[in-house]
Image (cartoon, rainbow, N blue to C red):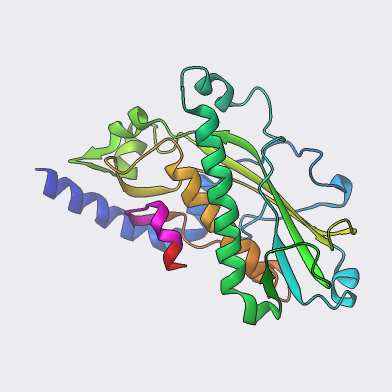
Amino acid sequence: MFKAKFVLVLTALLALVGCKSTLTSLLRADPVPLTDFVPHHEKLRRMDDSCPFHYYWADLEAFESANLKHIYIAPIEMGYLQKGNAWDEFAKNLTTAEEDLQDLAEYARLAYYKAFKSQEEAIGATVVDSPDVPDTLVVESAIVAFAPTKAGVYAAGMVGDWFVPCLGLVTDAISSGTIAVESRARIGKDGPIVAVVTDTENDPDALISLSKLTWTTSAKINIKRIAIQTATSCSVDKMEDLDRGYPIEFISTFSDADLDKM
């Protein structure tokens, strides 16, 4: 019975792939309010659903004239995590809350480091370990909202040990978590900010083994994706050239070790 239901759901998902733009619009999270981490709120351009980012701004003239040769990934800021979000209530009953947030921040920095490292040739700049190196673009990011995954919600879409999104959809439980990231790029350690991107993502709809699921697993999947898209954005002619990718991942056996494969 499980096998038959599993095949039925996969068939439905494959049919949905042809409706990528519709799925993207339906499953995309609404942006969270902007924080003071990013400047020029009035200049930020709201991007459409085909773009990986919700908001974007760049001083392309300053960026191109800086003759940047290096990129430094700064530690991830957690001080802008918005009060009153789902994490506040969740953390009250979690003894490892602070450790989990620190782990998430460290993971995010490594994800950005690996993503930009893989794009060195396309960008024409080398990732370095210090912001003090001359001609360096400093990439600073902050996790500004985090609503953790609730494994109990996913149980509504279980087939054996696997979560199946369409089964969750039947019970209106397709996604339960959210992560929001704001990034800014400046010329040098204390130089002017020349670019800003922000993104908010719901938990990815995927086949996820609950034996591997933690409170931060879905957030890490999204952070890895956002990091790759941020790095890729530095080598495209215009932001509209970026592809969000499919809103559904068919199989996910995610672990922290996945970063070693980037």
Looking at the rendering, which quadrant does residue 244 occupy? bottom right
Left/right placement of residue 222 relative to residue 194 reads left
Q: Is residue 220 visible to the viewer in this orientation of the structure?
A: yes
Q: Is residue 242 visible to the viewer in this orientation of the structure?
A: no
Count of numbered labels shown in the rendering: 0
Looking at the rendering, which quadrant does residue 253 occupy? bottom left
Tell me if residue 43 comes above or below residue 210 in the rendering.
below
Left/right placement of residue 206 relative to residue 75 reads left
The residue under the point 78% across, 66% down is 137
Tell me if residue 230 comes above or below residue 65 in the rendering.
above
Q: Which residues are magenta?
A: 249-259
Percent across and percent down for residue 242 are 62, 68
Q: Quadrant of the N terminus?
A: top left
In front here: 221 or 22? 221
Residue 250 drawn in magenta: yes
Farthest-out residue, left:
1
In front here: 223 or 140? 140
Percent across and percent down for residue 194 are 85, 61
Residue 109 drawn in magenta: no
Tell me if residue 154 comes above or below residue 108 in the rendering.
above
Left/right placement of residue 112 relative to residue 162 reads right
Percent across and percent down for residue 79 are 71, 35
The residue under the point 33% across, 59% down is 15
